[in-house]
Amino acid sequence: MKTSELLRYVAKDLLDDRVDMLSGESDELVSDTTIARHLAEAERILCRRAWVLEDVGPSLATRIQLVEGKMEYPLHKSTLFVKAARLSDSDIDLRRVGYEDNRSRYGFEASASAHFDVNAPSSENPGRPSRFSTDIGYRAIRVRMKPDAASALLKLHLVVVRMPINTISATTPDAEPECPEEFHMDLATYAAGKCLNVANVDAALRSLGKSYLEEFNGRVLEAKRDRQRLQQSQPQHRFGSWVGRDN
């Protein structure tokens, strides 16, 4: 649904003509700007809690240009989780590892004291990246090996779960929310609930607003459960090697 359609639905259908329903002197106590702000808030809540917005195609959040000798790259501010990463000339995903497993480490030294000396010189030759790790705390992705000259010609293609990039606004009535269309009506339910949860609305209408918000929270929880169920991996059995050990 377009933003303009959602605004009309909230104002007319859920609020039942705000001119008659809300008390006060003004005939527009709830403006389109306010409704749009609540719609945007609902979309952010839905995306953060239920991870319903997954991006696999070209976008600001899914393309990173590699740089020769550079291991760490900033993630887009909308990124919540990186599901996969691959080099632009390949269909094979890079291996995901933890932060500790993706740090440069000292190799074997004949002298035990040199091995633990943080001032001992150590370097790693650049090459083709084969694995990655992420730190969502400060929104960075780290690849290893450090890209060499050939790899620096490539991009990282990411599959990410993210927040909306373009905020719902009354100034862009023809735009659509970025979350899947199946959740657009839920955004409207939340917006109506927030509009009725104000001091100049009588108790009965505030109760209605509370029920709208509870309905929205239930839909978010349902969406979260659906995502977890759809993405749950089937049990896999491995033979011929220790569990957790690379073949």
Image (tube, helix red, strand yellow):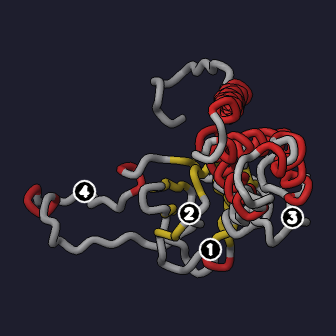
Give the vertical position of 217 relative to 142 (above or below). above
Q: Are marks 4 and 3 in contact (CB under 8 Å)?
A: no
Query: Which tag, 3 or 2, sits closer to the chain's start?
Result: 2
**Amino acid under disc 2:** Pro
Which mark is nearer the camera, 4 or 3?
3
The residue at which mark 3 appears reads as 175
9 left or right of 35 in image: right
Q: Residue furthest front?
A: 25
CA separation in Å, label 4 and label 3: 58 Å
Give the vertical position of 225 relative to 124 (above or below). above
Which mark is nearer the camera, 3 or 2?
3
Q: Are marks 1 and 3 in contact (CB under 8 Å)?
A: no
Which mark is nearer the camera, 4 or 2?
2
Query: Which tag, 1 or 2, sits closer to the chain's start?
Result: 2
Q: Quadrant of residue 129?
A: bottom right
The residue at which mark 1 appears reads as 151
CA separation in Å, label 1 and label 3: 38 Å
**Amino acid under disc 1:** Ser
Which label is found at residue 129? Answer: 2
Q: Nearer the viewer, residue 216 or 82?
A: 216
Q: Are marks 1 and 2 in contact (CB under 8 Å)?
A: yes
Which label is found at residue 108? Answer: 4
CA separation in Å, label 4 and label 2: 22 Å
**Mark 3: few, some, or many residues within 10 Å (few <14, many ≥20)?**
some
Query: Which tag, 4 or 3, sits closer to the chain's start?
Result: 4
Query: Which tag, 1 or 4, sits closer to the chain's start?
Result: 4
State the residue at coordinates (46%, 32%).
245
